[in-house]
Amino acid sequence: MGLRLSSVLLLFCGLLVAANFKLYLKDGGYHLVREYKVEGDRVRFYAVERSDWEEMPLELVDLKKTEAENAARQARVEEDSKLIREEDKARREEDKEVTKIPQDPGAYLIENNQLRVINAADSKVHTSKGRTVLKVLSPVPMVPGKATVEVDNAHSPNVIAERRPEIYLQLSADERFGIIKLTPKGDVRIADTLSIIPVTKEVIDNVEEVKIFRKQLTTSLLYKIWPEEDMENGEYAVVQFTPGKLNMQIWDFAIKAAK
């Protein structure tokens, strides 16, 4: 609402400025006017400074320069008005889509004007001791060395045909989030390669992030995210986590777009 009001105010201010323009004189000076009329060998104009009508000989006025600059200014105002209208239309459409997104934490798409839920993936932590189900609320105890966060199955059932999908992400907490590439390995996909430091038990994450744009849509931590560039066909996931805490939430998907 605030953005829309600001846009309207900017447009109004622009129109006010455009309503006044310079009536150039051949000696290099000008009058700031609201309008003017050529009447025979005289130019009659409304002077903004004095809020009154005045007139002067036509031979003193540089009409060519006045008309050229006025036309250019009017074109700029019309272009600005068009951009603001388009921005306002896009904002209204976005607001409409936001109402379709559930408030429950998760990842969602709008396809053909319909809501599509990307289900959370089953994931495990694989260490030298074996595999343990990853639990967000009670992180897995770690031992020094290497570990991986693995997503079950070799391929995601959530197939997307677009190379630059717009995904809505409702966060459960104010944490790091984004899109990562999953690395297939046998019948699983690797989401995160972990290094656990001896003594301190510090966990260092190593994820292959996709560069994205992000836009916060509500104060309740609803974001829209989309890749900066086209994504190659492959396995990916939307993730939410706190680095070093081993609490990654994963919503996996696969890009399978026509080449």
Image (cartoon, rainbow, N blue to C red):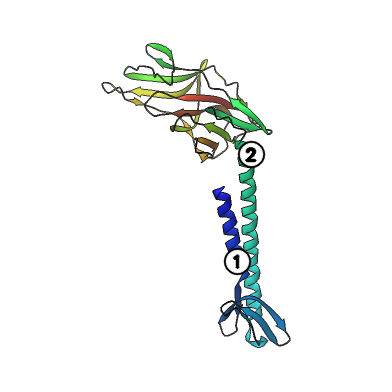
Q: Which amino acid lies under the numbered mark 1 shown in the image of this protein?
A: Leu
* Residue 221 falls left or right of residue 71: left
Image coordinates of residue 140 in percent, x first then y, are 38, 17
Q: Nearer the viewer, residue 88 or 252?
A: 88
- Quadrant of res 103: top right
Image coordinates of residue 234 in percent, x first then y, are 56, 27
Who comes first in sequence, dot 1 or dot 2? 1
Where disc 2 sits, the SS reads helix
> Residue pushed farthest right?
40
User: Where is mark 2, residue-wise?
Assistant: 96
User: Where is mark 1, residue-wise?
Assistant: 16
Image: 120 above or below 4:
above
Number of callouts in the render?
Answer: 2
* Mark pair 1, 2: CA separation: 32 Å
Where disc 1 sits, the SS reads helix
Image coordinates of residue 206 in percent, x first then y, are 41, 28
